[in-house]
Amino acid sequence: MSCGSKYKSGNCVADVLREIADAQNNIANDCCDSSCEQSIANLLGETPSPSNLDTVPVLLYCKDCSPFIGFGAPVDDIGNVFGSFYFRVKNINDNNCAVLELLRDEADTDLCPGCPADQATANLTATGVCITVNVECFCHITCLPAISAL
């Protein structure tokens, strides 16, 4: 099984995001210890892992190979805009538009990290802040190990 093999849209990033969204909403094979395939398998309970997993955090890369950062603010605090390189796939439609939820470590005080390695990831949590993206704009996806973020 390869990443995104369940779908054949012609856009591998879209196909992987669809597979992650399906796996997360429905709550493997021998491969890398840390990969999209492994994270999806862990989420679905196909490998030994904690049973409380609900999210595959993803990093997306623009066509120029730069990591994508999303920005948003909580509904009750529009003055608290923050950025994140890490996302939870909420859904993706047939037109390759995806709703992504920004993930943040609540202890991270850096509201605008300069690169993914600058952002705290020890306790990534769902923020409730979502953005809509056209996944055709991305050429690369990195999946982190499945976590409990909800």
Image (cartoon, grey):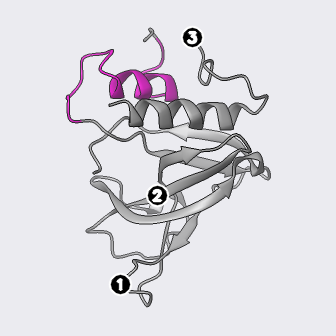
Q: Amino acid at mark 3?
A: Met
Q: Amino acid at mark 1?
A: Asp
Residue occupied by mark 2: 101
Q: Secondary structure at mark 1?
A: loop
Q: Residues within 10 Å of mark 3 (few under 14, many from 20)?
A: few
Marks 2 and 1, how far apart at CA:
16 Å
Seen at 40% across and 36% down, the residue is 24
In the rendered structure, find residue 1 and report the number of the disc placed on it.
3
Residue 117 % position (x, y): 47, 56
Quick check: 2 above or below 94?
A: above
Quick check: 66 above or below 77?
A: above
Seen at 58% across and 34% down, the residue is 18
Main secondary structure type of the part rendered in magenta: loop
Residue occupied by mark 1: 76
Quick check: 91 above or below 105?
A: above
- Whichever of labels 1 and 3 marks the residue nearer the N terminus, that label is 3
